[in-house]
Image (cartoon, rainbow, N blue to C red):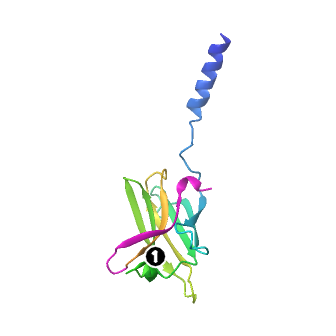
Amino acid sequence: MRQFVLVSLLTTVFAIYPSQTNAITMPCSMVLKPVDKNLKNAMGTALVYKVQLNPPSFSRTNVSILAVHLPEPSSYGNYDSYEGFVFKPNEISWRFKLYPTPEENSPTWAGRFDLITAKMENVQVQIRVSNSKTKKIGPRILTNNIKYCN
């Protein structure tokens, strides 16, 4: 009888408090690290949180990115800017322009995207070079997985 009560209690606890192993707690932030280990100074950060832009609409997820000490985009080929690239593999992706600050010698690049409605599970956040005229996106420069968002 005691085993039955214990099993019933444990089952109830797991049913009421489901596992959150794949879910992130928002707001959260994560460090975007260089893919190329030779980029010793390049680093970025992503802030992920819920926003409600036009009440009474439902909230959406915002991803804001800031990156410093990135090499000139042209050092990777026919590219002239950087973009934030957020994606769920084999499902959906979002791209948004990062804007440079007017600092000389290695500007800070920053941008945001406010309209994500998908669940933020198994999501990659990246900074990639891009060509603003052809809209071609290039290799990833900084990256991290949403599971490391704290």
- Name the quadrant of the N terminus: top right
Check disc 1: other Cα within 10 Å, few if <14, some if 14-19, many if 20+. many
Q: Of all residues shown, which one is farthest toward the bottom? A: 104
Residue 84 is situated, as x and y percent measured from the top left of the image, at 46, 69
Residue situated in front as seen by the camera: 13 or 135: 135
Q: Considering depth in this image, is 41 or 52 the residue closer to the camera? A: 41
Report which quarter residue 108 is drawn in.
Answer: bottom right
Foreground residue, 127 or 46?
127
Where is residue 8? Give x, y as percent. 60, 20
Q: Which residue is mark 1?
A: 82
Q: Is residue 62 above or below residue 14?
A: below
Image x and y of residue 137, in percent: 38, 71
Q: Is residue 85 above or below residue 107?
A: above
Disc 1 residue type (three-letter): Tyr
The magenta span reads 132-150
Q: Quadrant of residue 13?
A: top right
Which residue appears at 49% of the width and 79% of the height? 99
Local SS, label 1:
strand
Residue 6 vertical placement versus 125 (above, below): above
What's the residue at 53%, 55% (across, down)? 146
Where, quadrant-wise, is the C terminus in this rendering? bottom right
Does 140 lie within the magenta span? yes
Q: Is residue 14 highlighted in magenta?
A: no
